Amino acid sequence: MNRVIEAKLGNLPDSPGVYIMKDKNDQIIYIGKAVSLKNRVRQYFKASGHTGKVGAMVANIEDFEYILTDNEVEALILECNLIKKHRPKYNILLKDDKHYPYIMLTTEEDFPRIVMTRKISKDNNKYFGPYTSARAVRETIEVITRIFPIRTCSRDVREGKKDRPCLYYHIGQCPGPCLGNVKKEDYRSTIRDVCRFLEGRHDEIIRDLRFRMEQAAENLQFELAAVLRDKLNAVERIMENQKVISTAMEDQDVIAFAQADIDSITAAQIFFIRGGKLISAKHFILEGASESTLEDKASSFIKQFYSLSAYIPREILLQTDIEDRPAIEQWLMQLKGSRVYIKCPKKGEKRKLVELARRNAAEALQAYTQKAEREKARTEGAVIELASRLGLPNPPYRMECYDISNIQGVEKVASMVVFENGVPVKKEYRRFKIKTVESANDFASMAEVISRRFKRGLEERKGLVSQGQDFSKGKFSKFPDLVIVDGGKGQLNAALEVMSRLGLDHIPVVGLAKEFEEIYTKDGGDPIVLPRSSNALHLMQRIRDEAHRFAITYHRSLRDKGSLHSALMDIPGIGPKRMKELIKAFGSIDAIKRADFDALVKVKGMNKRIAAAIATYLKD
């Protein structure tokens, strides 16, 4: 324990709050809450020490800060917000929680629409989710618009404002409020039905639809009755697919966990039960859960999940009880606006639901670990295999691959892609215009690119050393453990000659010829042919194909830009400035061709005469 920590421990208040642990680089590594900061923080620095994750975390603490709150609930809310913002290394984190999609009803608008979103804002719109995938959201929206026609467009539709209807109006999936023939109150009634549908309150919808259908039939409104009958049948068919798993007929979330022995990976499973029926289920992977107790995982999961959730049920069933249950219940009550109960059932129907969720969590965990093992085999495992196949002293952690792209020597470009531990690192990709080679000479082009890349790297290294900085700070100063060139002996020999001239012949260089997937090496012997099922070969192919894709993409962009410049410069009255503004406004020849006269006139520096000349020239 250093002197800074020792001094701060003596001044800790006996008050609720949040504590923030930092490492030697002033990075936040852990955030926690406490009823008493004095008692809780001191526990980390007891002489007896800690093991596992807590021990590793305490060993890295060089300083800590704390923020006082009025009560434990405020501390919980602050802790949750800070974890979400900083994502500390030693906190339990929901994997990719921010990417889950939601359904949003834009109830702030006169005529709300239904859309998919990945961001929840503090507004008057209604959110439902999260869903496991964008596909699930799209399918749900499709079902809803078939049963309850509401708009999905982004038009500014207001009461009294008329516009031309879109396709969805003509196929019966939107009532057409843009026509001005839909009353706001009637449309809002449909929105209420949609809300109930998304909340799983199908029984209420069925009762209302049946009542309205019978009432329409009594009033001899047979067309309306038929429409309501079709809606009723559609909702009933959906209900048939939902399993009644709780006789309590309540809204419940059921949460359970499973943990792997290897790497302490933890899966959380949650069942969403609405009105006694299981309407959906999701699983999550928890990061940073090593050495944490089941109670810690449950508490962290609830705080992170419900801080993002659009709906909170009246009852949450847990696999295990949690220490801060009263504070979390009070926090959830503030979010929901009514009482929320967290329970850990020991027997009966509710315990069976928890056990069912636990079995599903174990199944999800098994699928995740199997996928992780396959991914490891095709990345880290492939790198180790490649080192063995090529006779390298160490696995090539960083690999760079180079490819040349040109069409009959026009707009010659090259790409450099980087893979680290078998995974692409796109921020390290680089691209080059060939400057010194006139004809379509791939060998000379490869020599130029390799020379420019490593000369630049050597210069950067010299500058960084003089400044006392490491090589990771430069754009080219990190050197690879293996260089791969796309091509056979010619491209390989060109690269080897440059590397030798620069004094970098200790870096292994190989060529991958596409026709027979042969690997050529420095020794000049027979090429190495890897088995078709080899993970090392698949990795080499992925790297080569990625380099090819990156080069082709760059080549096309330059070619398209060149043809655009050429076509525009041939138009009388178009100079460099007007050409620049046209490219900025439209981006392509096709877009300019499609543009109407008014759009062309609005471009900066344009007038009616020039706009007419552009339209006429491109049309011809």
Image (spheres, rainbow, N blue to C red):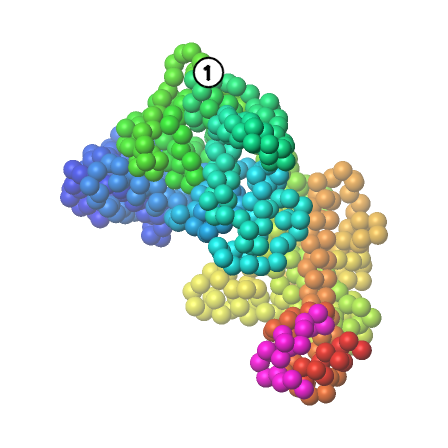
Q: Quadrant of the C terminus?
A: bottom right
Q: Position of residue 194 (x, y in %)?
A: 51, 38
| Mark 1 neighbour density, 10 Å: few (under 14) some (14–19) many (20 or more) | few
589 vs 361: above or below: below
253 vs 120: above or below: above
Q: Answer yes or no: is residue 213 visible.
A: no
Quadrant of residue 595 within the rendered picture: bottom right
Is 619 displayed left or right of 184 in the figure?
right
Q: Depth check: 362 or 551 in front?
A: 362
Q: Tag 1's secondary structure?
A: loop
Q: Answer yes or no: is residue 338 visible.
A: yes
Is 207 displayed left or right of 486 in the figure?
left
513 vs 133: above or below: below
Q: Position of residue 202 (x, y in %)?
A: 51, 28
Q: Quadrant of the N terminus?
A: top left
Range of residues picked out in magenta: 592-609
Q: Depth check: 301 or 197 in front?
A: 197
Q: Depth check: 398 or 415 in front?
A: 415
